[in-house]
Amino acid sequence: MSEKTLLNTRKIGIYGGAFNPPHLAHVLCARSAVKSLGLDKLIVVPSGISPHKPEPKGAASGADRLEMCKLAFGDIVGAEVSEIEVANTAERSYTADTLRTIMERERYPGEAVQLFLICGTDMFVTLPDWYDAKFLFKNTVIAHCARPGTPDGGKAPAFPPGTEAVTVAMPQIAVSSSQLRELLPQGGGFGLAPDTVYGYIVKNRLYGVDPNLAWLRRKAYEFYKPKRILHAAGCEEEALRLSERWFSCSGTARDSDNYEQFCREAQTAAMLHDATKKLTLDEQLELVEKYGISADEDELQAANLLHGKTAAAIARTEFGVNERVADAIAFHTTSRSDMNLLEKVIYLADYIEPSRAPFYGLEKLRRLAYTDLDGAVYFSLELTAADLTFRGIKIHKSTADAIHFYSPCGQTLKN
Ligand code: DGI
Ligand code: FE
Ligand code: FE
């Protein structure tokens, strides 16, 4: 290699891209580049306003792409993610300018630096047309991470004489950001991005994602004590059966007109409904603080009453669930007056799911749940009230309101 490849020089790779979102091929490319080029440092630069292509529809913001890059590349030794381009929201970002800034920043007295411009095939073949391409060719070694089915490295025909270009050998996996953006709204794509990136996409509901239920279930179960997982799974199964039974019945107040969507919401609420059940009251109170949950005096004194609300907060902030799902989780213990179908489904599924230990009235309740929905809600409330009264525990206002609302004769329970 030429004078650009001096011995004892610090090797720095610059890996720019839209990373919209970053995926496994990006990570493989970065890892392979660090290893095969022997990089001391890899600077990942999510792009700012692109001079090349318009933003794709539904693209994530610069701030989100920056965060996803940190998650995707953060554990590669020597890698850092630069906000140099995304911070510049005023004008288009040109790689040559970025390179100049980096050269300026990375210059240390008495030390030689060799720069590698790491590029995927799309970038590699169009490089000669880039703004101030001469500057790029002169100051960097072009490192091409070849994608499957594309011509391998070597020099692209129009590279000026003297340009150095190398091919970074990497495992061949066929995945692109545009393919991911297409799959995410269909419950797919979760295996094509690092798990942490997929989690970020779900949490922030980027790209119109419809979270994959198997992925969500795996994540939800991490919150449970092992023996409670059976309850969560049973609850999901029961919630699906109840949805199938009641969704299309006239007179059931429901928010979603789409049966498939309703079922996904019911499953999501069921798998997350007891996510905070294992926490102590103090731990629950920390969550109240952290998420700014509003809770009354009684709730603040009973972990049993709080766990629905804290689980709803986790579901909303960590898994990006909508308000319908969050409410069904929040009210699964006490219920409330005038519940919508999703809330009733979750409330009842929790009560009658197959792994529930038998209790007096369970068989009757299971029958009622499939013949008279509101009757079943009322019967559960009566059972709860009787149990609480027997144990000398105060009936919560929300429970009392529900009893009043669902009582066939409008009676109010005195306590
Ligand atoms: O979390 P699970 O065990 O699956 O079931 P759950 O969320 O219905 O919680 C049941 C517990 O909540 C049970 O110990 C009784 C308690 N509970 C239900 N309604 C009330 C209540 N506790 C009080 N203090 N007041 C209520 O109205
Ligand atoms: Fe619960
Ligand atoms: Fe439960």
Image (cartoon, rainbow, N blue to C red):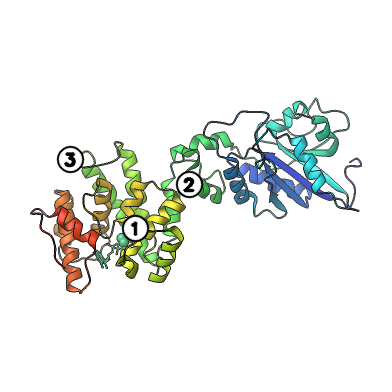
| Marks 1 and 3 close (CB-CB < 8 Å) | no
Give the left or right position of residue 69, taking residue 353 as reference: right
Q: Quadrant of residue 47?
A: top right
Q: The disc labelled 3 sits on which kind of residue?
A: Gly
| Residue at 52 percent of width and 36 percent of height | 181
Q: Nearer the viewer, residue 294 or 179?
A: 294
Q: Tell me how far mark 2 sits from mark 1, CA to CA.
A: 21 Å
Q: Is mark 1 within 8 Å of ligand 3?
A: yes
- Give the position of the N terminus as an image quadrant: top right
Residue at the location (61% across, 28% down)? 54
Mark earlier in primary sequence (1, 3): 1
In the rendered image, residue 271, in percent from the top left (x then y), is placed at 36, 54
Q: How many residues crowd mark 2 within 10 Å: few (<14), some (14–19), many (20+)?
A: many
User: Which callout, 2 or 1, points to the residue nearer the camera?
Assistant: 2
Quadrant into which the C terminus falls: bottom left
Question: Badge 3 is on which residue?
Answer: 251
Q: Quadrant of ligand 2?
A: bottom left
Q: What residue is disc 2 on?
A: 202
Circle on res. 52: none
